[in-house]
Each structure stands twice: as structure tokens, then as C-alpha cells.
Image (cartoon, rainbow, N blue to C red):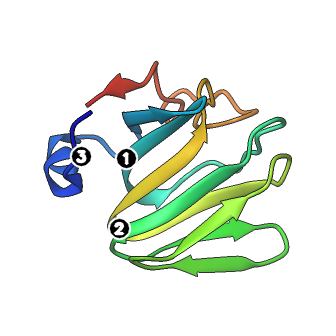
Amino acid sequence: MRKVVLADKFAEIREHWRPCVVGTLNGQHVKLAKFRGDFVWHHHADEDELFLGVRGHFRVEFRTHVEEIGPGEFVIVPRGVEHRTVAEEEVEVLLFEPVGTRNTGNVQHAVLTAPPYEQL
């Protein structure tokens, strides 16, 4: 039961697209990640995801529209909805999703699918 200082935890993250767990709450992981570039199109059959912008601007692209996200803004992606994230510059993002959620959902990607999550 210690506070989490986001700036300190983000400073420990060295790789883009590799979420790190900073907490667990009622079967949900609280994860931090740095994004840069384009992620793979994917969906999660059984999990909703929350993306909260902490630093920088990114977008969550859907097949029907795009949501621009900045610091202090979030979007919830409902289960089953195909999406991808895109960041022109490095951004810091907090994610909230069920334990066991694979970052690439229904897609196995040689580079972007993260190994088991690191706990910071």
C-alpha cells in the first residue's frame, strides 16, 4: 500500500509498446506504456480497454472514426471493437484492462505482441 509516482514509473520504461503493470485492482491491471508509431489493428473478444493520456497526444483509430487523445483524456474501447493506436511522437499512457489481456488481442505479431507483463 504505497503511492505510485507516475513520472518515476514512466522513467523506468525503455521500450515502446511494452506495457508494464503498476497495480492490480479487482481483477484489473493498471498498466503504463510508452507509444510511438503505429500499432497493429486488433480487437479483444472479451475485454474492454481504457486508454488515458498522461503525456503527449495520440489517436485511437477505429474503422468508423478516430479519437484524438491528449493529457487528461481517455477513451474506452469496448470488447470486440477493432482498433489501433497511433502516436506521431512518444506518448505516455495509462491502461486499465482485465488481468491476462494480451496487448495485441486477437493478433499474434512478431514484434508488437508483448511478453508477460513486467511489474514496475
Looking at the rendered structure, the kind of residue marked 1 is: Leu
Residue 20 horizontal side relative to residue 87, left or right: left
Distance Cα–Cα, label 3 vs label 1:
11 Å
- Secondary structure state at the residue bearing disc 1: strand
The residue pinned by badge 1 equals 32
Residue at 20% from the left image edge and 45% from the top image edge: 9
Label 1 crowding class (10 Å Cα cut-off): few <14, some 14-19, many 20+?
Answer: many
Q: Amino acid at mark 2?
A: Val
In the image, what residue occupies the spot 34% across and 65% down?
Answer: 91
- Is the C-beta separation of discs 3 and 2 under 8 Å? no
Q: Of the numbered discs in the image, which one, if any, rests on residue 4?
A: 3
Residue 3, image x and y in percent? 22, 45
The residue located at (83%, 54%) in the rendering is: 81
Q: Is residue 33 above or below residue 108?
A: below
Could you say which quadrant of the image residue 100 lies in?
top right
Q: Report the amino acid beneath label 3.
A: Val
Q: Which mark is residue 54?
A: 2
Looking at marks 3 and 2 on the same chain, the residue that comes earlier in the sequence is marked by 3
Query: In the picture, residue 71 is in which quadrant?
Result: bottom left
- The image position of residue 107, as x and y in percent, is 71, 33
Which residue corresponds to the image point at 21% horizontal and 37% vertical from the top-left? 2
3 or 2: mark nearer the eye:
3
Please provide percent x and percent y for residue 78.
79, 55
N-terminal of the pair, mark 3 or mark 1, is 3
Quarter placement of the N terminus: top left
Q: Please, what secondary structure does the residue beneath circle 3 have?
A: loop
In this image, 7 relative to 49: left or right?
left
Q: CA distance from mark 1 to mark 2?
A: 9 Å
Q: Which numbered tag is attached to residue 68?
A: none
